C-alpha cells in the first residue's frame, strides 16, 4: 500500500483523458464578439431551458435555476480535475497536482474563468442564476390555489385537484397502513394487560437511561423479551434461520425486511401527524426524539394522562437561558396503536 505522501500512477485511459480535455475546453471557452451564446456550454444550457413538446416555450425561473445549479456543480468538478488532478493525464499532457502550493495554482486559474463577472461560461451561469432567483421572487407563487363554489374541491396548477373526501381518506388509509405495519412488527402480539393509567412516569427525572419503561415500579423492563422471542421463533418472517438440528443463525434478509417495515411505519406516522393532528410539528424534530434520557438529551416520549405523548424542549431566547417543554396530544387513532 502506498504511503499518504506518495504519488500513485493511474493506468492510462486515452478516452477518459480526451473527454476531460474536451470538457475543460468547453468550460473555459472564450466568448466570440462578447456573445456568451457563442460558447458550447452556454448554448447547451439554453437548450436545457426549453420546454414543450417542440421546444417552443422556455422554463420558468423556478424550474431553470436548479438546472443552472447542477451545471455550475459540474463545471467546478471539471475545473478541479483539470487544474489539480490527483493522477496524471499523460495522454493530454496534464500533470498531477503538486505537493505544495496547490491553493496558489488553483487561484491563478480560477480568477480568469471561475468567478462572477468573467467572460466565461461560469461567469455567465452565475449571472443567470442571480437573475433567475431575483425574477423568481418578483413573479410571485408558482401557482395559485382555488376553492370550488361548494367549498369541497381545491384545485391548483390548472389540472390538479383534491376533494375534501379524498383528503379525509388519506388519513384513514395512513391509519390503516400504520395498523398493518404495527401488527406485522409486533408479530400479532397484543399486550392488552398493560394499563397506561397505572404506569408511573416521572417527568422530572433526568437520570441517564430513565423512561417509564425502565421504571422499576411499572415492571416493564423485560417486556421486550416477549416480542424478541416471537421475532426469533415465528414460522413466518422470523429473524432466525435454521441451519441444522438445534442450530440457527440470523436471517439477514428477514432482518432487513423488518427494518424496512419499521421505516414504512415511521412514514405512516409522519403522514398521520401532519394530516390528522391539529398541532403538527416539524418531522425533522419528531425523528430525533429519544425514548429514554441520554447523557446529552432528555427523552421525548412520556406517559401523560394514560396516553403516550411526544415532548420537546423549546428555547425561546437568543442566549438560550429561557426554555420550556411542549407536550403534544396525538389523535386517538395513533394512541391506540401497539408500537414495537
Image (cartoon, grey):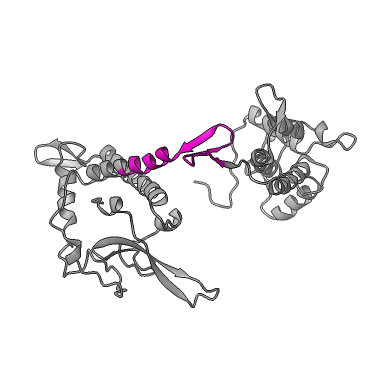
Residue 126 x/y as whole percent = 74, 46
Q: Is residue 151 magenta?
A: yes
Vertical placement of residue 139 versus 218, above or below: above
Q: Is residue 270 magenta?
A: no
Residue 101 x/y as whole percent = 71, 55
Q: Nearer the viewer, residue 168 or 245?
A: 168
Q: Residue at x 83, y 43 (%)?
A: 119
Q: Nearer the viewer, residue 55 or 254?
A: 55
Which quarter of the picture shows residue 85? top right
Vertical placement of residue 135 versus 15, above or below: below
- Count all numbered tags in the image, as a single digit: 0
Vertical placement of residue 172 versus 49, above or below: below
Residue 279 x/y as whole percent = 42, 58
Q: Is residue 340 visible?
A: no
Give the side of residue 181 with respect to residue 223, left or right.
right
Residue 205 x/y as whole percent = 29, 74
In this view, the residue farthest toward the front is 150
Q: Residue at x 28, y 54 (%)?
A: 335
Which quarter of the picture shows residue 66? top right
Give the side of residue 223 with respect to residue 283, left or right.
left
Q: Nearer the viewer, residue 110 or 263?
A: 263
> Which portion, as a residue range, is magenta?
146-175
Q: Residue at x 25, y 50 (%)?
A: 337
Amino acid at each position: 500500500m502506498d504511503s499518504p505522501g506518495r504519488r500513485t500512477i493511474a493506468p492510462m485511459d486515452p478516452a477518459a483523458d480526451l473527454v476531460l480535455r474536451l470538457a475543460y475546453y468547453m468550460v473555459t471557452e472564450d466568448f466570440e464578439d462578447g456573445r456568451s451564446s457563442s460558447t458550447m456550454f452556454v448554448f447547451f444550457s439554453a437548450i436545457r431551458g426549453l420546454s414543450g413538446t417542440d421546444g417552443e416555450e422556455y422554463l420558468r425561473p423556478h424550474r431553470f435555476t436548479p438546472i443552472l445549479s447542477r451545471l455550475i456543480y459540474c463545471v467546478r468538478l471539471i475545473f478541479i480535475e483539470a487544474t489539480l488532478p490527483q493522477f496524471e493525464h499523460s495522454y493530454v499532457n496534464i500533470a498531477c497536482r503538486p505537493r505544495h502550493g496547490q491553493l496558489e495554482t488553483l487561484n491563478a486559474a480560477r480568477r480568469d474563468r471561475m468567478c462572477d463577472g468573467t467572460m466565461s461560461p461560469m461567469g455567465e451561469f452565475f449571472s443567470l442564476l442571480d437573475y433567475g432567483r431575483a425574477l423568481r421572487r418578483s413573479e410571485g407563487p408558482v401557482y395559485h390555489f382555488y376553492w370550488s363554489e361548494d367549498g369541497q374541491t381545491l384545485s391548483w396548477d390548472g389540472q390538479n385537484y383534491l376533494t375534501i373526501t379524498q383528503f379525509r381518506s388519506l388519513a384513514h388509509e395512513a391509519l390503516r397502513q400504520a395498523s398493518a405495519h404495527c401488527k406485522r412488527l409486533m408479530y400479532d402480539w397484543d399486550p392488552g394487560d398493560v394499563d397506561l393509567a397505572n404506569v408511573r412516569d416521572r417527568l422530572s427525572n433526568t437520570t441517564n437511561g430513565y423512561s417509564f419503561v425502565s421504571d422499576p415500579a411499572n415492571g416493564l423492563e423485560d417486556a421486550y423479551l416477549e416480542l424478541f422471542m416471537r421475532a426469533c421463533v415465528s414460522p413466518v418472517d422470523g429473524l432466525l434461520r435454521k441451519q441444522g438440528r438445534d442450530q440457527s443463525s440470523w436471517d439477514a434478509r428477514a432482518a432487513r425486511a423488518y427494518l424496512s417495515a419499521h421505516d414504512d411505519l415511521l412514514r405512516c406516522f409522519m403522514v398521520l401527524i401532519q394530516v390528522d393532528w391539529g398541532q403538527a410539528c416539524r418531522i425533522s424534530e419528531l425523528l430525533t426524539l429519544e425514548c429514554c434520557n441520554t447523557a446529552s438529551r432528555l427523552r421525548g416520549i412520556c406517559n401523560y394522562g394514560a396516553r403516550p405523548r411526544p415532548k420537546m424542549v423549546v428555547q425561546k431566547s437568543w442566549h438560550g437561558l429561557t426554555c420550556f417543554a411542549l407536550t403534544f396530544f396525538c389523535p386517538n387513532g395513533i394512541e391506540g396503536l401497539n408500537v414495537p
